Amino acid sequence: MPVTKNTASLLSLIAPLFSYLKDEDYGHVLQNAAWQDVRVAAGPSLGEALALPAWEVRSSFQNELLVPGMPLAAMPVESLYKAWSAQEGNAFGATRGLYLGDPARHLGAVYEQLAIHVPEAFASMPDHLTLELELLALLLEAGNDAAARQLVTDHFDWLGDYDAALADRADMVAHNGALVPARRRNLLDGIAFLRALTALANRITLSVLDGRDASLRAYAQGDRR
C-alpha cells in the first residue's frame, strides 16, 4: 500500500512535542482532538503512554530534558548520537556528543536548496528531530516518496540511541534521593512520554521506508513494526 498524506499528518502532530513549547503553543496541542485518535490508533502498548501531560508536568520536564546544557538534558538532535564527522583528518571526527556534525551540515544544505528557513531557536541544531520530522512530512505532502525514503535512510537511524539516552535519564532520576517526589514524578512521566513518542516516530519512519501506509487505520489494524 503506498504511503499516503495521512502519514504526513501524523508526523506533523508529533513533531512539535520533541521541542520546548510555550504555554500557548502547548495549549493548542491539548485542544487538538486528533491526538486522541493517534493514541487509540497507536494501540494499547503506546496509547496509554501517549496521553498528553498537563501543562504543569510538561513545563516541569521540558525545562530539564529539552533545554541544552541542563544536567538531565536529553536533546533529540541527530549529531549528538553519531560521530561528529566522517571526513578524514578531522580532529573531532570520531567524537560524539557534539552539535553541528555531518547530519546537521547535510540537512543545512537540504534546507537551503529547498529555501526552508531554519528558526533561530534551531540554528545550532538543524538536525533536531522536530525539524527532521517536519521535513519528512513536507516531502510526503509533496508526493516525493523517493526523497522521503532517502531522508529516513540518511537521518532516522539514531532513534534507538535517543531512546537509550532517555532510559539512562530515567535511571538517574529514579535513583536521585535528593529529588522531591513531585519533581521526580514529573520527570519520570515526561521521560515515559518522550520514549513512547520516540517509539511512535520510529514506527512511522519505518513505514515510510517500507513504502507502507502509516494512516491511523493501518495502525489500528495492527500494521506495525
Image (spheres, rainbow, N blue to C red):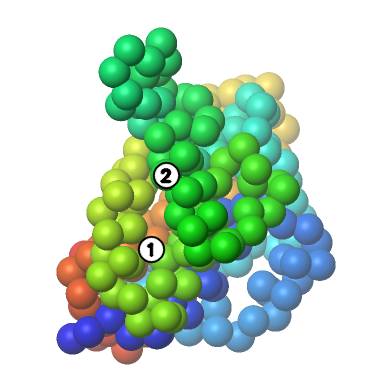
SS under mark 1: helix
Judge whether 89 appears above or below 139 on screen.
above
Give the residue type that dot 1 points to: Leu
Q: Residue at x 72, y 48 (%)?
A: 120
Q: Which residue is drawn at 68% across and 54% down?
A: 119
Q: Which quadrant, please, contains the N terminus?
A: bottom left
Disc 1 target residue: 200
**In the image, 105: left or right of 86?**
right
Say which mark, if any, is on residue 28: none
Disc 2 target residue: 106
Percent coordinates x, y for residue 174 in the rendering: 53, 32
Residues at marks 1 and 2, CA–CA distance in whole angstroms: 25 Å
Extreme residue toward the right, this view: 24
SS under mark 2: helix
Percent coordinates x, y for residue 28 in the rendering: 73, 75
Give the residue type that dot 2 points to: His
Q: Which of 144 and 47 is in front in this view?
A: 144
Judge whether 114 appears above or below 97 on screen.
below
Percent coordinates x, y for residue 22 in the rendering: 78, 58
Mark 1 or 2, nearer chain start: 2
